[in-house]
Amino acid sequence: MSPFTYDPTADAGIVRLLITDTDVANPDNQIFEDAEIDAFLTLEGSVVKRAAARALDVIATREVLVQKVIKIMDLTTDGAKVADALRALAKALRDEAAEDLLAAGGLFDWAEMVVDDFSARERLLKQAQRGLI
């Protein structure tokens, strides 16, 4: 595994903090390699909370694939329930990221107006170029 780094002032460190991948005392217990954390950040456009949500989704998938439902004597594990809880946390992080974007005024959209025949033809042409018709 690549070296484990944890710097809570860097984006990758904040992702690790949000997914509780912070075992500095024993770096062998890391959940993700540094390169994987960087990949999550790249996939999510460097939005830390969305990258953490993506990482939690990957952890949830691993839980389902590895644990499933196992019952041995008095011990029971349920990977599906753990995965559901992790996905709920991931959804909460995505919602927070969307709220942060709204608060920063980052959502923008526009509407095309059709006021005459020329603008109607122009709008149809633009929709065709976008592949919408």
Image (cartoon, rainbow, N blue to C red):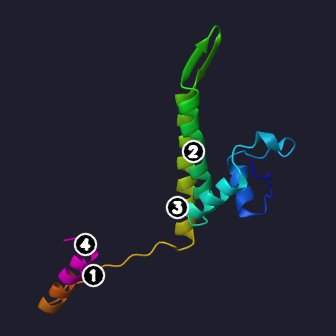
| Residue 55 makes an appearance in the image | yes
Circle nearer the viewer, 2 or 3? 2
Horizontal side of residue 15 vs 115, given as left or right: right
Q: CA distance from mark 2 to mark 3?
A: 20 Å
Q: Tell me the magenta residue range.
A: 124-133
Horizontal side of residue 126 vs 44, given as left or right: left
Q: Nearer the viewer, residue 18 or 24?
A: 24
Q: Which mark is residue 112?
A: 1
Q: Secondary structure at mark 1?
A: loop
Q: Are marks 2 and 1 in contact (CB under 8 Å)?
A: no
In the image, what residue occupies the spot 69% across and 47% down? 32
- Is 17 included in the stretch rendered in magenta? no
Q: Secondary structure at mark 2?
A: helix
Q: CA distance from mark 1 to mark 4?
A: 16 Å
Q: Is residue 78 above or below residue 99?
A: above
In which quarter of the view is residue 122 placed?
Answer: bottom left
Q: In which quadrant will I find the C terminus?
A: bottom left
Q: Residue furthest right?
A: 25
In which quarter of the view is residue 30 placed?
Answer: top right
Q: Which mark is residue 131?
A: 4
Question: What x and y, as percent, mark residue 129?
Answer: 25, 79
The kind of residue tagged 4 is Gly
Q: Which mark is residue 98?
A: 3
Please name the residue that numbered disc 2 is placed on: 58
Q: Are marks 1 and 4 in contact (CB under 8 Å)?
A: no
The kind of residue tagged 3 is Ala
In the image, what residue occupies the spot 62% across and 61% down? 41
Q: Secondary structure at mark 4?
A: loop
- Is 131 included in the stretch rendered in magenta? yes
